Amino acid sequence: MVTMHVVELESCTVTFVDEDIVHTHFKDNHMVEVSDVQAMFDAIEAERKGRRALLMVSVGSGTTMSNDARAYASAPASSRFIAADAIIVRDFGHQLAANVFVRHHKPGRPIQMFPDRDSALAWLQEHRHLVG
């Protein structure tokens, strides 16, 4: 198992949980924009040297994503960085926003919402075969 490595970015913390799983937590009271998503992808790409990751995403209180950021995060090019997404939803409002991401933007990779970190991690473990 690889030692956990953490990258602090302006809008989020990117934690490399193990050799395949990355946890991005967007900080409280932040409007996530395309540049924030790109910074996250850049951090993942630099650390993983081009290997795709299984991404667990959590969002702080008062934080949301712009429509442009959601579109960018789910665009076909984003699958170059991410093999599958597990989104931890913290409340009903966040669940509605995550539903928009999943159903409207339709990322071309497995994506699922979870009530907690443990169930998200368990689901990601089942998708290790997607990382190449």
Image: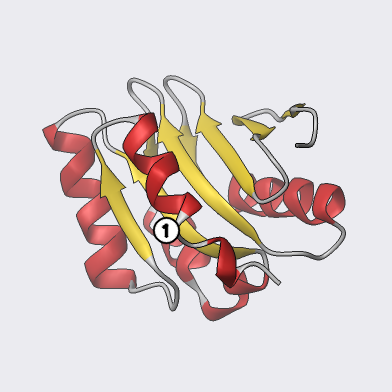
Q: Residue furthest left?
A: 92
Residue 65 visible in the snapshot:
no
Q: Residue at x 67, y 64 (%)?
A: 81
Which is nearer the eye, 101 or 123?
123
Residue 35 percent across, percent down from the top left: 64, 50
In this view, 61 is above or below 100: above
Which residue is label 1 attached to? Answer: 70
Q: Residue at x 27, y 49 (%)?
A: 113
Residue 17 percent across, percent down from the top left: 65, 34
In this view, 72 is above or below 15: below
Q: Residue at x 87, y 59 (%)?
A: 49
State left or right for residue 124 relative to residue 42: left
Image quadrant assignment for residue 90: top left
Which is nearer the eye, 60 or 32?
60
State left or right for residue 122 relative to residue 75: left
Identify residue type, mark 1.
Arg
Image quadrant assignment for residue 68: bottom left
Q: Where is the C terminus found, in terms of image quarters?
A: bottom right
Secondary element under disc 1, as helix, strand or loop, is: helix
Residue 13 percent across, percent down from the top left: 63, 28
Which is nearer the eye, 33 or 109?
109
Image quadrant assignment for residue 5: top right
In this view, 126 is above or below 83: above
Q: Where is the N terminus found, in terms of image quarters?
A: top right
Residue 120 visible in the snapshot:
yes
Q: Residue at x 81, y 54 (%)?
A: 48
In this view, 38 is above or below 30: below
State left or right for residue 118 relative to residue 92: right
State left or right for residue 87 relative to residue 124: left
Please tell me how crowded label 1 is: few (under 14), some (14-19), or many (20+) other residues with Cα within 10 Å. Answer: many
Colour setting: secondary structure
